[in-house]
Amino acid sequence: MSHTQPDLAAAIERRVVAALVGHRITDEQADLLLRVSERLGRDEFVVQCAWCDRFELDGHWHAAPREFFRSAIVLARSTHGICPDCRREVRTR
């Protein structure tokens, strides 16, 4: 069964909300997570730093609740990279 973009976006939104239940997040974090879910709904990948778990959005790296990345949909639509901070740390070792 093929999912339409609105169906996929709604499923992602439900998973994000479920992942965040019981967690206190700021309005900024909620906005970032909504923007990530919209990206996933457009069938785009989310780049996650393999070292610190931050994710890239619009050229900036942001922290997210770890539970967000445990969502099956996010795991299926994420790829790993390395953020600039971790790259600098790795190079100085």
Image (cartoon, rainbow, N blue to C red):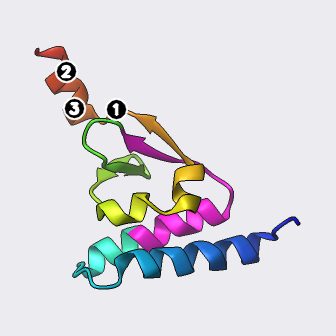
Identify the residue at the far right of this view: 1
The residue tagged with tag 3: helix, strand or loop? helix
Q: Is residue 90 a member of the stretch shown in magenta?
A: no
User: In the image, residue 77 lies at what x, y percent?
Assistant: 59, 51
Residue 82: numbered disc = 1
**Label 1–label 3 contact, CB within 8 A:** yes
Bounds of the magenta segment: 33-49
Q: CA distance from mark 1 to mark 2?
A: 10 Å
**Are dots 3 and 2 in contact, CB under 8 Å?**
yes
Tell me which residue sits at (40%, 65%) in the image. Answer: 68
Res 92 → quadrant: top left
What kind of residue is marked 1?
A: Ile
For label 2, the residue is 90
- Marks 1 and 3, Cα distance to the nearest angstrom? 6 Å
Label 2 sits on what residue type?
Val
Q: Position of residue 73 (x, y in %)?
A: 58, 61
Q: Earlier in the sequence, mark 1 or mark 2?
A: 1
Compute the Cα span from label 3 to label 2: 6 Å
Q: Are marks 1 and 2 in contact (CB under 8 Å)?
A: yes
